[in-house]
Image (cartoon, helix red, strand yellow):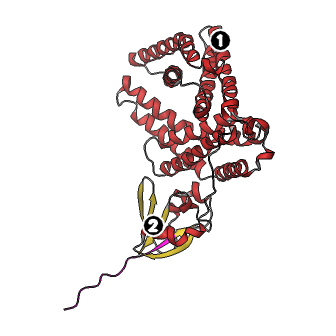
């Protein structure tokens, strides 16, 4: 009696001509209409025709493909990703990025990390994974922050101006989704589930705005421009770099980070000079924006900066975040103008929370400024 022979499983692999998916740690395959996208977070499965990549799947990987056509690149028997990489290894172009302790080298490593984080968050946003919109928004803000703080070592502000503007647009399109999430959780402390229907509508509107932004041509143009910037900054001959970019990071980045901290210092002083009201709220908002830029400057230059201010910085930002959330909640409550006492009590509580945050701001900045002292010395 002869042994039963199990037929080999044959899978077709799809990618762009330049293997954008594989170069970013992804692999797309199809076996008898069963589609599978292998990602660092695990596989994603779809059902569809074996004749073409399902449109939903094409949109899912848009941050990587940039609308390039997905075509068949290999047909393998039970080999999996290892065999795929062996089959296509000669076509996978991975630029060599040797260690570089120059000011540009240190900052550019951080930029590359955030570019990867932006694409990974995009993939998660399109799958409605928890906290993904927030992570995508933070990656965009980090890029803006590092472009602002370290422009002199990244080609200058003129080169980065349009990119920063486009990243601000993206952050603005993502912001409502995160803001609604925060305010919904905050409202439950006093409204229970009475506001769920209202916030559900806001959530869907914000999600639609996010989807529209990520499917737009403007978004793809932004991703392409960020790629071009990374290549230009990485491959530009060193002799063409500006002098600050060529110098050791430890000699250049502390001074640039100190300038960002100086912006926070001046903005905190302005808050103290204003009475409670819209002008004070606007001044605190300016502090909040400057504090975020400081945080990202410290993150990007961490390996070259003589400070470790994480606990004090976290406390300072938490204070500013609480103020912002309280102000937004108060505005929302005023707009809703609920008739019962719960609304009035919640409005009063949010006003107290905002005032308390402002009162604590100078002391929190004093503690953080002390930890940042080595930037000045």
| Image quarter of the C terminus | top right
Residue 14 shows in this picture:
yes
Q: Is 202 on the left-hand or right-hand side of 4? A: right
Residue range highlighted in magenta: 1-13
Residue 269 numbered mark, or none: 1
Number of other residues with Cα within 10 Å of mark 2, as a class: few under 14, some 14 to 19, many 20 or more = few
Q: Label 1, label 2: how many angstroms apart (C-alpha)?
A: 58 Å
Principal secondary structure, stretch drawn in magenta: loop
x, y percent for residue 77: 42, 77
Is residue 344 depicted above or below 76 in this figure?
above
Identified at 80% across, 46% down, the residue is 239
Q: Is 165 on the left-hand or right-hand side of 204? A: right
x, y percent for residue 55: 53, 64
Identified at 54% across, 36% down, the residue is 176
Is residue 377 depicted above or below 295 in this figure?
above
* Residue where numbered disc 2 is placed: 82
Identified at 49% across, 37% down, the residue is 202
Q: Is 377 on the left-hand or right-hand side of 320? A: right
| Image quarter of the N terminus | bottom left
Residue 172 shows in this picture:
no
SS of the residue at dot 1? helix
Cβ–Cβ below 8 Å for labels 1 and 2?
no
x, y percent for residue 248: 69, 35
Q: Residue farthest to the left?
A: 1
Identified at 56% across, 46% down, the residue is 118
Is residue 309 depicted above or below 55 in this figure?
above
């Amino acid at each position: 009696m002869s042994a039963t022979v199990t037929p080999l499983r044959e899978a077709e692999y799809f990618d762009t001509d330049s293997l954008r998916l594989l170069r970013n740690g992804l692999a797309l395959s199809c076996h008898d209409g069963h589609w599978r996208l292998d990602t660092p977070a695990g596989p994603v499965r779809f059902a569809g025709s074996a004749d073409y990549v399902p449109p939903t799947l094409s949109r899912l990987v848009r941050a990587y493909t940039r609308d390039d056509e997905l075509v068949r690149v290999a047909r393998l028997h039970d080999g999996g990703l290892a065999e795929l990489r062996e089959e296509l290894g000669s076509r996978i172009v991975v630029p060599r990025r040797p260690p570089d302790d120059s000011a540009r080298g240190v900052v550019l490593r951080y930029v590359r990390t955030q570019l990867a984080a932006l694409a990974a968050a995009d993939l998660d946003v399109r799958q409605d994974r928890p906290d993904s919109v927030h992570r995508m928004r933070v990656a965009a803000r980090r890029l803006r922050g590092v472009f602002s703080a370290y422009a002199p070592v990244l080609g200058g502000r003129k080169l980065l101006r349009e990119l920063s503007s486009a990243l601000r647009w993206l952050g603005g399109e993502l912001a409502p989704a995160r803001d609604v999430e925060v305010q919904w959780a905050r409202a439950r402390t006093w409204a229970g589930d009475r506001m769920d229907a209202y916030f559900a509508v806001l959530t869907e509107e914000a999600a639609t705005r996010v989807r529209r932004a990520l499917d737009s041509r403007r978004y793809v143009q932004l991703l392409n421009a960020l790629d071009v910037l990374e290549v230009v900054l990485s491959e530009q001959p060193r002799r063409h770099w500006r002098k600050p970019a060529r110098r050791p990071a430890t000699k250049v980045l502390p001074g640039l980070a100190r300038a960002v901290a100086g912006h926070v210092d001046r903005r905190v002083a302005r808050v103290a000079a204003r009475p409670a009201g819209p002008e004070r709220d606007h001044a605190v908002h300016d502090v909040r924006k400057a504090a975020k830029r400081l945080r990202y400057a410290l993150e990007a230059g961490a390996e070259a900066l003589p400070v470790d201010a994480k606990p004090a910085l976290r406390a300072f930002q938490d204070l500013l975040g609480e103020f912002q959330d309280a102000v937004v909640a108060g505005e929302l409550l005023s707009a809703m103008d609920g008739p019962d006492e719960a609304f009035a009590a919640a409005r009063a509580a949010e006003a107290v929370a905002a005032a308390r945050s402002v009162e604590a701001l100078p002391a929190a900045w004093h503690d953080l400024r002390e930890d940042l002292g080595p930037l000045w010395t």
